[in-house]
Image: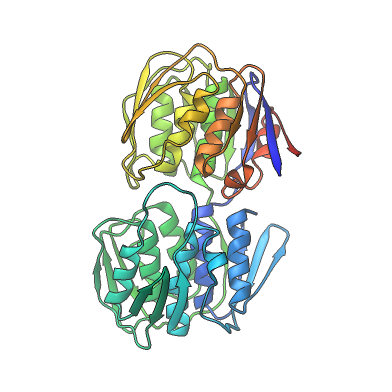
């Protein structure tokens, strides 16, 4: 077991290239099944969830290996269409394999997925979309048995713009006869990245980034080389860390438009934000002020994954900020840990009220989930003394090298085995 020790009080300064996006690479790795060929994924982050995805691909009969920072996946041979319960429970995103396996094999057997405990996240929208394409799905004892000898293109109207359901519908539609139209689709940049990958493989997918996506199925696909987009939530984390510590950092190889709601909030808090085509600079005095209510919503709204790190950035300074969490029921599990460090936060239902304090102090805290764990590090960088952060397995699900990245920016941080 490992811990991270953070010595607060050092402003972050310098340049950093942001890792590839976790929420892009996982569906892209599932999508490699459709190619039946070898795909090279550049800028693939070395994450716990990526390791789990590699285990699933190998279990299915694929070859997967690293070449430097590139991950190569050979899906020419697929010998299974089931995923064991132990692998499914390791991460929420494992459900994305359902659409890909159905499109490749015509059948799939798997259990309900695991992941961070953020409240109910039903996969009914995924299953409804696949049934509309012609899949027969039986649910029994937490297991899913799916058959789809012939899937046909159709019109799928999602009741909510679910990212996962949109991705599963796209992947399954690639294996369906005819044209599928997905309405009220999720618009996240990661959906656009998945489309770019599939198009590079020879698929006919268009409309990603809008609410209507069209897929022409049964195209003959092949391997490709694809570079994953930068992780906008990792970028938001480092921007918030620099804002809270009074830093001056430049993030390279990012798309500023993907971070517009986060940078708007940080600008309102008193930071200076500048950017060009693929880099973003933040300068902060460290004396942040409160911002207008932050309400999480699907893209292009404020991302739920950035809520915790922005909250941590605004713990010190002046004023009161209200957060309204509209995406998940249990997204404030990090709040009791922040209170251990002297934060003044009150929660009731969807609402959290942050009253800025003059200073934070070091404490022994534990990550409760992926983004909440990152928020503890953002707060610890501002606290007086040395903070110990435990339960790192949560953080490692989404941050490939958070300790090394922050060291590069001048933080007093190290990881120790206990």
For the view shown, which residue lies furthest in the bottom direction? 149
Q: Is residue 84 found left or right of 215 in the rendered image?
A: right
Residue 222 percent across, percent down from the top left: 53, 79
Residue 279 shows in the view: no
In the rendered image, the vertical position of residue 313 relative to residue 140, given as above or below: above
For the view shown, which residue lies furthest in the right direction? 417
In the rendered image, the vertical position of residue 388 relative to residue 229, given as above or below: above
Number of numbered discs visible in the structure rendering: 0
Q: Nearer the viewer, residue 206 or 89?
A: 89
Q: Is residue 232 found left or right of 132 in the rendered image?
A: right
Residue 265 percent across, percent down from the top left: 39, 29
Residue 313 percent across, percent down from the top left: 49, 26
Q: Quadrant of residue 405?
A: top right
For the view shown, which residue lies furthest in the front direction? 141
* Residue at 43% across, 16% down: 356
Q: Quadrant of residue 170?
A: bottom left
Residue 312 shows in the view: yes
The quarter in which the C terminus is drawn is: top right
* Residue at 31% across, 27% down: 293
Q: Is residue 408 found left or right of 223 in the rendered image?
A: right
The quarter in which the N terminus is drawn is: top right
Q: Is residue 243 found left or right of 161 in the rendered image?
A: right
């Amino acid at each position: 077991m490992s811990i991270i020790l953070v010595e607060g009080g050092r402003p972050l300064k310098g340049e950093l290239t942001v890792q590839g996006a976790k929420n892009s690479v996982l569906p892209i790795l599932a999508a490699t099944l459709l190619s039946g060929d070898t795909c090279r994924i550049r800028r693939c982050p070395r994450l716990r969830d990526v390791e789990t995805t590699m285990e699933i691909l190998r279990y299915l009969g694929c070859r997967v290996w690293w070449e430097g920072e590139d991950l190569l996946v050979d899906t020419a041979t697929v010998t299974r269409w089931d995923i064991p319960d132990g692998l499914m429970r390791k991460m929420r995103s494992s459900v994305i394999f359902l659409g890909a396996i159905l499109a490749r094999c015509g059948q799939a057997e798997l259990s309900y997925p695991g992941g961070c405990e953020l409240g109910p996240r039903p996969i009914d929208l995924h299953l409804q979309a696949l049934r509309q394409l012609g899949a027969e799905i039986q649910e029994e004892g937490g297991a899913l048995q799916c058959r789809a000898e012939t899937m046909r293109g159709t019109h799928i109207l999602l009741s909510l713009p679910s990212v996962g359901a949109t991705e599963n519908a796209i992947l399954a539609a690639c294996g369906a006869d005819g044209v599928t139209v997905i309405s009220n689709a999720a618009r996240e940049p990661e959906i656009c990245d998945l489309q770019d990958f599939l198009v590079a493989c020879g698929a006919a997918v268009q409309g990603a980034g809008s609410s209507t996506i069209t897929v022409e199925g049964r195209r003959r696909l092949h391997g490709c080389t694809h570079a994953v987009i930068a992780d906008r939530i990792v970028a938001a984390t480092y921007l918030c860390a620099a804002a809270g510590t009074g830093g001056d950092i430049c993030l390279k190889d990012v798309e500023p438009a993907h971070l517009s709601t986060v940078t708007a909030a940080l600008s309102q808090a008193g930071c200076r934000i500048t950017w060009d085509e693929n880099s973003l600079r933040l300068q902060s005095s460290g004396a942040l002020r409160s911002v207008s209510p932050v309400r999480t919503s699907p893209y292009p709204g404020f991302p739920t994954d950035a809520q915790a790190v922005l909250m941590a950035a605004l713990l010190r300074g002046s004023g009161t900020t209200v957060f309204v969490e509209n995406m998940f029921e249990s997204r404030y599990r990090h709040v009791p840990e922040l209170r251990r460090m002297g934060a003044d936060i009150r929660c009731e239902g969807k609402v959290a009220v942050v009253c800025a304090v003059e200073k934070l102090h070091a404490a022994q805290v534990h990550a409760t989930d992926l983004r909440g764990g990152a928020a503890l590090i953002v707060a610890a960088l501002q606290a007086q003394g040395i903070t110990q952060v435990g339960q790192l397995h949560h953080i490692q699900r989404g941050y490939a090298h958070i300790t090394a990245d922050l060291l590069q920016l001048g933080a007093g941080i190290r990881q120790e085995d206990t």
